[in-house]
Amino acid sequence: MTDSSSVLIVTDIQNDFLPGGALAVADGHAIIPLVNEIARKFRNVIITQDWHPAGHISFASSHPGRNPFEVIDLRYGPQVLWPDHCIQGTFGAALAEGLDIPHAQLVIRKGYHAHTDSYSSFFEADRKTPTGLTGYLFERGIETAYVVGLATDFCVSWTALDARTHGFDTVVIEDGCRAIDTNNSLAAATAQMDAAGVRRILSHQL
Ligand code: VGL
Ligand code: ZN
């Protein structure tokens, strides 16, 4: 059991990111039993949920003539366009049925502003609009953030990088994650995490 200064952030394990979902991550379902097991070792667990309004700016369908996985420039920088996914209140946005973490303390939703995406659980994609998670973790006395979930190269890595920025000791548990890997995004995210001092471990090292 980890101590009270650590938190496990369970990122976006939602139906749309599982095989059969709108933005399926290959093998995404395979992490669920392991994530449940990892979570039992943590006193503090929070869960994140991608939570977009219909017509969200990150959806290719909101940009006539564009296709999913193309990249466009938005006012806050490059944006990968996605299939419509995790629309508020839909089955696709619901947490995966097999996720069994009754002791989770907070569910934080993100990506609910129509004109801004939010991979990270700390800041939206403009890199300045906070979700409030930093204050929550600071007030709770958290010093170390462990991250698992979907997808390694987007919400997991952006969350881990922002955790580092805020001074948290940050650890990605790699076998508790799966990647989308579009346009070399997994290698790029891994390099960025290494450069920022995010530690990468396997769950048996916990
Ligand atoms: C995610 C793409 C779009 C993620 C969310 O959870 O990694 N990826 N929205
Ligand atoms: Zn999204």
Image (cartoon, rainbow, N blue to C red):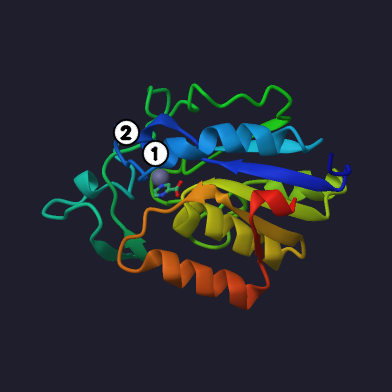
Q: Which residue is drawn at 79% across and 55% down?
A: 144
Instruction: Please state which amino acid type lies under the numbered disc 2.
Output: Gly
Can you tell which mark lies on residue 21? 2
Q: Where is residue 106 in the image (x, y as percent from the top left)?
A: 69, 32
Q: Residue at x 76, y 45 (%)?
A: 7
Q: In which quarter of the image is residue 29?
A: top left
> In the image, is the residue at mark 1 within 8 Å of ligand 1 by its beta carbon?
yes
Can you tell which mark lies on residue 17? 1
Whether residue 76 appears in this view of the structure is: no
Contact flag, marks 1 and 2 (Cβ < 8 Å): yes
Q: How crowded is mark 1: few (under 14 residues within 10 Å), some or many (20 or more)?
A: many
- In the displayed structure, does residue 147 sit left or right of residue 30? right
Q: Where in the image, quadrant-wise, is ligand 2 located?
A: top left
Find numbered disc 1 in the image and state the secondary structure of the residue it sits on.
helix
Can you tell which mark lies on residue 61? none
Does 24 sit above or below residue 168? above
Q: Where is residue 24 in the image (x, y as percent from the top left)?
A: 33, 41
Question: Which residue sits furthest front?
Answer: 204
Q: Which residue is drawn at 50% across and 27% down?
A: 95
* Distance between mark 1 and mark 2 Cα atoms: 6 Å
**Looking at this view, is 178 or 123 the one in front?**
178
Whether residue 37 appears in this view of the structure is: yes
Instruction: Please state which amino acid type lies under the numbered disc 1.
Output: Phe
**Looking at this view, is 109 or 102 the one in front?**
102
- In the displayed structure, does residue 130 sit left or right of residue 103? left
- In the displayed structure, does residue 141 sit left or right of residue 175? right
- In the displayed structure, does residue 141 sit left or right of residue 186? right
Q: Where is residue 2 in the image (x, y as percent from the top left)?
A: 84, 43
Does 13 sit above or below residue 26? above
Q: Residue at x 42, y 53 (%)?
A: 179
Does 70 sit above or below residue 54? below
